[in-house]
Image: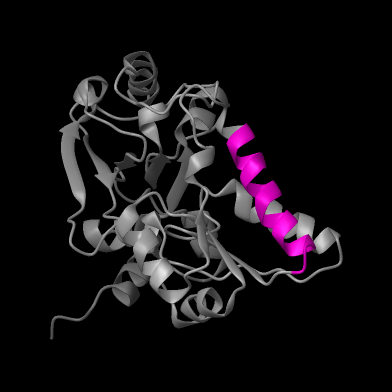
Amino acid sequence: MTLAAKNQIESADIVFMGIMNKVGEHAVRKLNPNSVSLDDLYQDGKSRALTYAQMTDRIVQAVVEGNKVCAAFYGHAGVFVTPSHEAIKRVRELGLSAKMLPGVSAEDCLIADLGIDPSKFGCQSYEATQFLFRDYRIDPYMTQIIWQIGLVGEASLSVLDAKHNKPGLALLTEILLEHYPADHELIIYEAPTLPILQPDIQRLALRDLVHANTNLVSTLVIPSLGLPAYRSDRLEKLGLTEQQVINYRSPSTN
């Protein structure tokens, strides 16, 4: 956590925790003993949409009661965390103060662990089921990041187990084969949630994706096919040639 986040946890009247591991919860409780886990709201077969709504209600109610409230979530509080955004919105609508502080997200870990610079090829990012259900357009020249592939195609929001999701992975594979060769290397990534852990990194060919071992937090990374061709008409309007751009952007070896 950042120093600013640590300060907010320490100074809060109550801290709600959506951290999902006991070590993380212990670290927060050491900073503020009046910390309460939200994990009891998760239940197998219960819609996560309902769980998130109940989390939001708890947070907002504590603010309404006059408390200085901090909600601590693992990773970045604004990435795949519905209650944080909704709670801030509702508190502000009540004329009260609320803000979000940044944290280290799974994407930040992914960039560091895989050595990916999202500016090199560009980057497209999607949630897996939204990607499957909606008419997105893949640019294979850009790096693709597809989140939560273990739940791809799961529409009920009630599944907490990713072991039996072969139909979703099969359809995702079918879609990707429209854009990439079957032997294109993919990466299934899981960020470490504790300092003592290592990232889980699986490399496999696209054709083997349907047989991959995934879980609720597995992220699929699809490396770029390479940079697309230059647009000579655009370069011409700027008074440039392709060779000039190559020379400008390539480090000298002299």
Identified at 34% across, 26% down, the residue is 162
Q: Is residue 141 above or below residue 152?
A: below
Dominant secondary structure of the residues highlighted in magenta in the image: helix
x, y percentage for residue 254? 13, 86
Quadrant where the N terminus is found in the figure = bottom left
Q: Residue furthest left?
A: 254
Colour setup of the view: one colour
Left/right of residue 6 with respect to residue 133 in the rendered view: left
Query: Which quadrant of the structure image shows residue 174?
Result: top left
Q: Residue furthest front?
A: 33
The front one of 28 and 74 is 28
Identified at 42% across, 26% down, the residue is 152
Q: Is residue 164 magenta?
A: no
x, y percentage for residue 149? 37, 32
Identified at 20% across, 81% down, the residue is 252
The front one of 215 and 28 is 28
x, y percentage for residue 241? 41, 66
x, y percentage for residue 209? 24, 25
The front one of 197 and 63 is 63
Q: Is residue 61 magenta?
A: yes
Query: Which quadrant of the structure image shows residue 49?
Result: top right
Q: Which residues are magenta?
A: 50-66
Q: Is residue 84 above or below residue 42?
A: below
Q: Is residue 42 above or below residue 28?
A: above
Q: Is residue 98 above or below residue 160?
A: below
Q: Residue furthest bottom?
A: 254
Left/right of residue 109 with respect to residue 32 in the rendered view: left
How many marks the image carries: the answer is 0
